Image (spheres, rainbow, N blue to C red):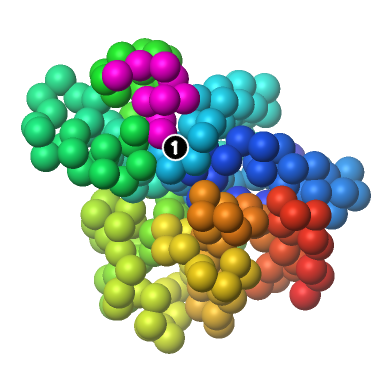
Amino acid sequence: MTHSLTFAIGDIHGCFEELLALLAVCDIAGHGEDTRFVFIGDYVDRGPDSRRVVEFLIRRQSEQGRRCICLRGNHEEMLIHAAGRHRSDRDLMNWWGNGGERTLESYGVDDPGDLPAEHLAWVQKLPLTHKDQHRLFVHAGVRPGVPLSLQSQEDLLWIREPFLSSPDDHGLFVVHGHTPITSGRPDLRANRLNLDTGACFGGPLTAAAFSSGRRAPLMFATSMGDIVRL
């Protein structure tokens, strides 16, 4: 099936109401066309409704299959370690100190290992990247100068510099999040697009729409109701 539009959505971080609002705006912006959604990670922590976000995405994937692609973010990676059988105190404190306590509150449990087994299994199976003809979708970014096929998991989930300041063509246009943008607006460069507009810090949740015919985005949509065509 040919998907006429692909929407990429930035870091959700438990902001469930913002997610629903953004998806409604995407429906308007897409004029009911056949669409695919790529969620680029960080569904949990910091915001109030991690459980509702995860439940929603699991259900959406079950209903829509390859039209709903969910990638792993560094917060899912921290949760995997914090909930693991062989976790260390450092694993727990690292996750807790980065907003994990809000996730526990949303589930009504005191230990990440007590999250529903279905949810933990889903998180563990999340892929690191998604590619199409023109773009690489990934949570954090890539290391400049390293072939895409040789990128490390740590960089794909965690990198900031030297990726953010690099003008290099990475072979594919990189669509990412991970580093919150203080302006609350997506950061569009010649070689990449950052969609983390800080929803969990009071900013909007943002999506970018892409077509198969061009590398750069066609438009941005936000949970505030904005649609900006490029």
Q: Which class describes the residues within 10 Å of circle 1: few (<14), some (14-19), or many (20+)?
A: many
Q: Is residue 40 visible?
A: yes
Task: Give the camera-side residue of 40 and 16.
Answer: 16
- In the current view of this chain or complex, which residue is farthest to the right? 31
Residue at 80 percent across and 54 percent down: it is 225
The residue drawn where x is 51% and y is 70% is 182
Q: Element at badge 1?
A: loop
x then y, percent, for residue 26: 78, 49
The span shown in magenta is 102-110
Task: Tell me, yes or no, whether the highlighted magenta stretch contains residue 104.
Answer: yes
- The quarter of the displayed image where residue 36 is located: top right
Query: Does 146 appear in magenta?
Result: no
| Quadrant containing the C terminus in the rendered view | bottom right
Q: Quadrant of residue 140?
A: bottom left
The amino acid type of the residue labelled 1 equals Val
Viewer can see residue 149: no
Name the residue nearer the viewer: 24 or 192: 24
Left or right for 4, reference 124: right
Asked where in the image residue 57 lies, by quadrant, the reply is top right
Relative to 57, 99 lies left or right:
left
Q: State which quarter of the image contains the N terminus.
A: top right
Q: Residue at x 34, y 33 (%)?
A: 101
Asked if 223 appears above or below 143 in the picture, the reply is above
Horizontal side, residue 160 vs residue 56: left or right? left
Image x and y of residue 171, in percent: 45, 73
Asked whether, in this view, residue 94 is left or right of residue 176, the answer is: left
Q: Main secondary structure of the magenta part?
A: helix
In the depicted view, which residue is nearer to us: 205 or 97? 97
Residue hosting label 1: 44
Q: Which x, y percent locates residue 90?
A: 11, 39
Q: Which sits in the foreground, 213 or 88? A: 88
Q: Tell me what residue is drawn at x 19 percent, y 34 percent.
A: 92
